[in-house]
Amino acid sequence: MKFSSPSADESSIIALKFIAFLASDETRCERFSALTGLTLQDLKDGAQKPDFQGFVLEYALQDESLILEFAGMANINPQTLSAARQALPGATYDI
C-alpha cells in the first residue's frame, strides 16, 4: 500500500467510503452513535458536507484498530486517513 497525500476531492471520497464502512456494520455504527451521539440518519444527512466528513475522519483517527480495518478493506495506506482528514475542513461538527 503506497502512501500519497490525497487531494480534497480524494479526501472526500475516502470520507464517504469510511461513512459507508461505518454504516455497513451494526456494531461499528452503534459504537459511533454511543461515542458521538449521532445516529445512522445523521451519518446519511451529513455525508455530503465536507466539515462533517472531516469530523467522521477525526472520529476514525481515535481508534487504531478501526483505521487498520478500514484501510485494509479500502486497500489504502493507514496514513492516508490522517492526510485525508487534514485536507478536509472542520475539527468538530455541530448538529
Image (spheres, rainbow, N blue to C red):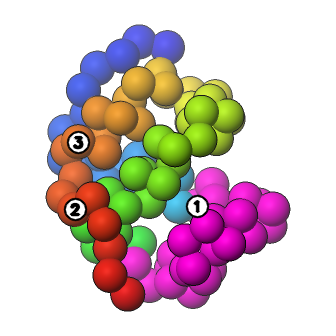
Q: Mark 2 touching mark 1, by CB under 8 A?
A: no
Q: Which residue is mark 3?
A: 86
Type of the residue with mark 2: Gly
Q: Which residue is mark 1?
A: 20
Mark 3: few/some/many CA within 10 Å (<14, 14-19, 20+): some
Q: Secondary structure at mark 1?
A: helix
Which residue corresponds to the image point at 63% horizontal and 54% vertical from the top-left? 21
What percent of the width, then of the height, locates residue 32? 63, 65
Amino acid on which the number 3 mark rests in the picture: Gln
The percent coordinates of residue 57 (x first, y second) are 42, 51
The answer to whether residue 35 is seen in the rendering is yes
Magenta part, dominant SS: helix
Q: Which residues are magenta?
A: 20-46
SS at circle 2? loop
Q: Position of residue 1 (x, y in %)?
A: 49, 14
Label 3 – label 1 distance at C-alpha: 20 Å
